[in-house]
Amino acid sequence: MSYLFDPAPVIALPVEDANDFPVNRIFCIGQNYAEHIREMGGADTDIEPVIFMKPASALTLGPDVPYPPVTTDLHHEVELVAALGPDGVIAAGVGIDLTRRDLQAVAKKRGGPWEIGKAFENGAVIGKLRTGQPPATGAIRLTVNGTPRQHGNLDQMNRKLPELLALIGRYFTLQAGDLVFTGTPSGVGPLLPGDRVEAEIDGLPPLSISMTDRKASP
Ligand code: MN
């Protein structure tokens, strides 16, 4: 097969003690922790979660993550990430769903899609994956420059992982290589260039990133 130009390389995530995980699609769940729904101004804290996507090209492993363009309000959202193989979930990791909150707010106000707030390059940060079933309970936390920002427990998820997969499966056919961000606990907040971010979930490899300087807008 020859192409008009060289195809983009396969995007892959490192896995502890195993071969790399080739990434297909990145599904994201929003509004899955009651306290986070509340902090975002929601009254109904048990609504059906939102499903959105980021392209695989949004993925970054860090440790250096460029502060994205066109925002003055980049937020961190620490999340459990499930990784699917040919027969279902085969691994999990710690993720940070970076969000241009100002642009997401504009999109929400228009009733339009969230891509400009969510699907930008380097907006999906994921640490090293660990094989096996993801933990269903345990602490999930994030610090910025050593200061605690988010601290919840996976058992606070309104919909647990099997329910989330079933929900996504109503609308899409899940495939090997798909990743699922499962929503964030409360405590989301802004990041600035130079910030050092540590994200942890009990039982999974920790994730450390540094926000580097803002890239010039194209
Ligand atoms: Mn999120």
Image: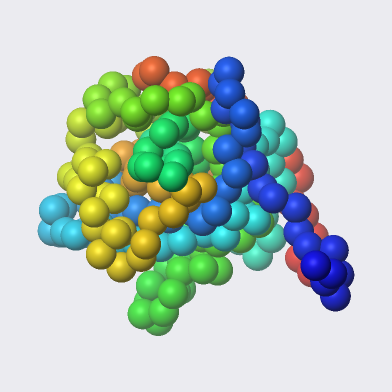
Q: Quadrant of the C terminus?
A: bottom right
Report x, y in % for residue 23: 57, 48
> Residue 189 appears at what percent x and percent y?
45, 44
* 152 on left or right of 176: left
Q: Quadrant of residue 6?
A: bottom right
Q: Is residue 177 visible?
A: yes
Q: Is 2 displayed left or right of 106 in the figure?
A: right
Along the line of sight, the residue nearer the viewer: 155 or 128? 128
Using the image as rendered, state which of residue 22 and residue 68 is in the foreground: 22
Q: Kindly identify the residue that appears in the image at 34 percent across and 53 percent down.
A: 29
Image quarter for residue 135? top left
- Residue depicted at x 76% and y 45%: 213
Q: How is the image coloured?
A: rainbow
Q: Quadrant of the N terminus?
A: bottom right
Q: Is residue 49 left or right of residue 134?
A: left
Could you tell me which residue is drawn at 72 percent across and 36 percent down?
64
* Count of numbered circles on the image: 0
Kindly tell me whether residue 194 is visible in this rendering.
no
